[in-house]
Image (cartoon, grey):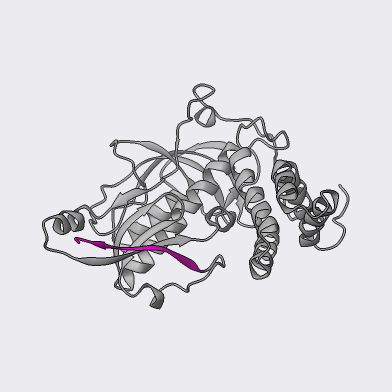
Amino acid sequence: MAAPAGPLADRVRARVDHELTVHGGDRDAARAALIKTAVPDVMELFAASRVGGRYEHSEFPPTVDILKKASQKGADQIWEGRPKWRAEELHRAARAGHVRLDVIALDMNAAYLAALKTWLPIGKLVHSEGADHNPKRSGVHRVTPAAWGMPDLPSPLGARKEPGDLWITEPTLRLLLRCAKLGFCETPVIHESWTSGASEGLLEKMRRTLTEVRKEAIANGDDVTNEYVKSMYSKFVSTIGESTANREIRRPDWMHIIRSQAFANLWLKAHKAHAAGLTVVEMSGTDELHVAGDWQQVFPEGRDLSQVKAKSIYTLGE
């Protein structure tokens, strides 16, 4: 593999400049062309970012049964912890007229781009049994989670209603273990795992590159580059599983882990708000958090990855 020519960010900028030139400055046409090639472009960027990397990752390891879809349109056995939660006691009190709160709906910026920083398995997944968790490995785990009894914070398991064992990813397990240390719940029981030696840096160069170009595009009001970058990282996540749109890699474990990391990051924002004295009202999807209180004392406002945007304000109990 040839070494990348120049900074990785220049590759992204050059693609945008090329399409703008080919389409005579027509920004809509250039945008459409860039979005169309986002998958091969982001895979080229990923390959270039791995040149000289410490680890040689597996692109087509054997897919274990729990990561295989039951049917073409079906799902596999992994639970990602996607949240869909609201503070029911608070809403009941508001409906009864006992509570009136001004609520701000906050939007987390580029949630999947931020989630590229996560512990990913490097090689093929290997089966193991037992309750031990090795932080130097990553994968998926069959656990019995403890009951969640905090009414003012959502469970890290998201919208899961069914009791009993389930297969979860590394970010969800690490978040449950963290919650147990905080005294929010009991430690989950790990029954078996499929894991590999792991690294938190496999996607880091690509993540930093896309973050840099995104920040520059926002500062310049460059919607073409910004939408191209968004298409690159979002399609990277959505196609690295078993998608026919991406023939360069097949890592459904990575796909689930990155998505779960986005949900875990959102939960951590909710916990930060709660710890700072804000009232957590709702949390859903990858990027939506509703709170009441002086949120600007807790979260910086803006469009960077470390900042949040206010989407709307409404009154609960009005």
Quadrant assignment, res 222? bottom right
Main SS of the magenta part reads: strand
Residue 11 image position (x, y, % from top left):
80, 56
Q: Nearer the viewer, residue 93 or 1?
A: 93
Quadrant assignment, res 7? bottom right
Most extreme residue toward the top is 71
Numbered range of the magenta stretch = 307-318
Residue 193 image position (x, y, % from top left):
48, 39
Is 131 situated above or below 199? above
Q: Is residue 289 visible?
A: yes
Residue at the (70%, 45%) spot, across then down: 32
Residue at the (65%, 42%) spot, across then down: 123
Q: Is residue 56 visible?
A: no
User: Would you say residue 154 sits in the magenta stretch?
Assistant: no
The reply, left or right, for residue 29 in relation to residue 166 is right
The reply, left or right, for residue 272 in relation to residue 10 is left
Which image quarter holds the C terminus? bottom left
User: Would you say residue 312 sits in the magenta stretch?
Assistant: yes
Q: Nearer the viewer, residue 49 or 165?
A: 49
Q: Nearer the viewer, residue 29 or 2?
A: 29
Is 316 situated above or below 172? below
The reply, left or right, for residue 303 in relation to residue 85 is right
Residue 247 image position (x, y, % from top left):
72, 33
Q: Report the number of numbered marks.
A: 0
